[in-house]
Image (spheres, coloured by chain):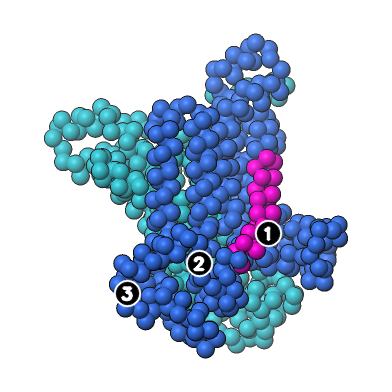
Chain colours: A blue, B cyan
Amino acid sequence: MRFVLRRLGFFTLTLWAAVTLNFLLPRMMPGNPALAAIAGHRGSLSPGALRVMEAQFGLNTHQSLVAQYVKYIGDMATGNFGESLTTQPGNSVAHMVLDAIPWTLGLVGVTTVLAFILGTWIGIVSAWRHGGRVDSIMPPVFVIMTVVPYFWLGLVLILIFGVTLHWLPYFFTYDFTLTPGFNGAFIGNVLQHAILPSFTLLITTIGTWVLTMRNNMITTLSEDYVRMARAKGLPGRRIMLSYAARNAILPNVTGFAMSLGFVVGGAILIEYVFNYQGVGYLLLDAVNNDDYPLMQALFLLITVVVLVAILLSDIATAILDPRTREAS
Amino acid sequence: MAMPRTLGGGPGAAGRPGTGGPQVLVPAGGLPTPGAGITGARSLRRMVRAITANRKATTGAALLLIFSLVALFPGVIAHDDPTAEIYASKLGPSAHHLLGTTALGQDMFAQVIYGTRPVLEIALGVGIGATVIAMLIGVAAAYLGGLWDSVLNLITDVLLVIPLFPLLIVISRYLGVGGAGTEVMIVVITATGWSYTARQLRSQALSLRNRDFLEAARVRGERPLYIVVVEIIPTMTSLLVASFLTNALYAVLFSSGLQFIGLGDPNVISWGTMLYWAENNEAFQTGQVLWIIVPGLCIVALGAAFALLNYAFDEIGNPALRPVRSMRGKRVQPAQ
């Protein structure tokens, strides 16, 4: 219980740090670029929106920094993220973010789960056949796969399967000609649009799971209890899964919990390359348009999701592994 | 909270692990526990021998050497000015223009060659900078203990969980006028990226705290600075090298990603900005395939150099991971 409370404390503190970064960054930078941007968009803003914006970034206010800060924290705590400045002027930021979330969750979330399952399995089998032909060429291949930049692989896949072969769509989340709805044609179209970005993400992330699992499993395979299991004549499959893999998988599971947290902000460049209208695309849109309220809200959202995932994984680890409880 | 950092939301993920940044390689196994008597020079010599004995390490080192030479003497290899827009645009590869020309009429080969230096500068700058900061903070936290340890540890933990790539995007935007140049990139990526290593180094330093050889130094009456520099830091050589390689790799991926989306200085000639201009000029639609393929391959090759070296050091530190020469006909025994 004390452990959970400590983690909750840490969670709150990190959240506070992220909000404070959001507050301080635009005010610390030379020339206060956020203010310059607001000034630049003055003509296109309604007076009301302008006043909100000015208040949010400390322009033309006679409030002290501390008073601004208190108000800012209050706004963030009550979910008052303001209105979009330039991307969709006047639209509620919270609304825009909520619209983008399902796309990212669907694309990156599903792919992350797939990569984890597939990668862990490959790692288990590869470690089990340590020294075999596949295992001897595999580590360097996966090491190299982990350094391929997402966005570049995305471009290459677009070139091959989109521009050249015309097999798959590579722009937007669905065809503009279709009306979104819960029917076969639309769902099929959405899935088609997800294939290339999802494949890009899968290829570039799977290596980490494979290598971590393989290397942990190899270390575990040299433990005495595994030799004992062999001596008892247990079937190989049982030793592989119930003895070695079961103990070696913990780091991968922890990593998986963390990577779920990075789902929302994790594929920014993939969404950018494929014009996939998720959270990452929205963030870059906001960045390119100097839409600071939207940018701040998204950064905060991405951080909060990570924190929640870490908190949950900590609690899960504490329940599953008594050693962590004692250590703290 | 000693979790492996996965999937940074980097140019890939981030981050490093995590963060919408680049992807992270999680070193397996625990921390190496060096024997008390290993001196820096000796472990360095061992390292050189290890590199030549491990095929992955040799490949990585060779790649790194080639890129370093190209970065040092670009003029020897490419004879064109990479910025001059003086040629016909969109030429195909030829003897005059090995990779053809860009849509803006620049020689692409010269751009690839001259683009090596800024990337390596960022990799080295961040690799060294982040490692030094991590070392100072990690060792200070472990050595000073008490309140200092709690505070430094907290800062490290907070930075560790804030998604790096989105943070980099936000900071780069605020810094924004004209995009981030090489120095700014180094500072920003270093400032945000040191936390993972600091945590590792702190654990290592903590595990040493009560070892006999440190006790002996204290009894001899050595000053704390001497103990830290001469006794503690040499035992961390392998972690420091791993930290340099990991941070350099992230720097390459993060900075290329930032440049690609236009947050770098578009006038710097580097692989990331080449990709930015290629994308903006619709290189694929106009058939300028090499404009995108070649800079990307260079990023992969340089990244692979750092990653292969890192992985090889992991194998060297943990002999069980080394490739097994297969024993034909026999059941493969678990490696020792």
Which SS does the magenta portion mostly show?
helix
Give the vertical position of A67 relative to A231 (above or below). Answer: below
Determine the CA span between mark 1 and mark 2. 21 Å
Q: Between disc 1 and disc 2, whose residue precedes?
A: 2
Q: Are marks 3 and 1 on the same chain?
A: yes
Check the image and name the residue furthest to the top. A232
Q: Which dot, 1 or 2, sits closer to the camera?
A: 2
| Magenta span includes A116 | yes
- The chain ID associated with circle 1 is A
Crowdedness near tag 2: few (<14), some (14–19) or many (≥20) residues, C-alpha within 10 Å:
many
Give the vertical position of A284 relative to A202 (above or below). Answer: below
Q: Nearer the viewer, residue B167 or B130?
A: B167
Residue range in magenta is A96-118
Per the image, the residue denoted by label 3 is A63
Q: Are marks 2 and 3 on the same chain?
A: yes
The quarter of the rendered structure image containing the N terminus of chain A is top left
Q: Position of residue B260 (x, y in %)?
A: 57, 69
Q: Nearer the viewer, residue B240 or B136?
A: B136
Q: Residue at x 62, y 45 (%)?
A: A207
Q: Which mark is residue A103?
A: 1
Q: Position of residue A28 (x, y in %)?
A: 35, 71
Determine the CA span between mark 3 and mark 1. 40 Å
Q: Between disc 2 and disc 3, whose residue precedes?
A: 3
Task: Name the amino acid, label 1.
Answer: Trp
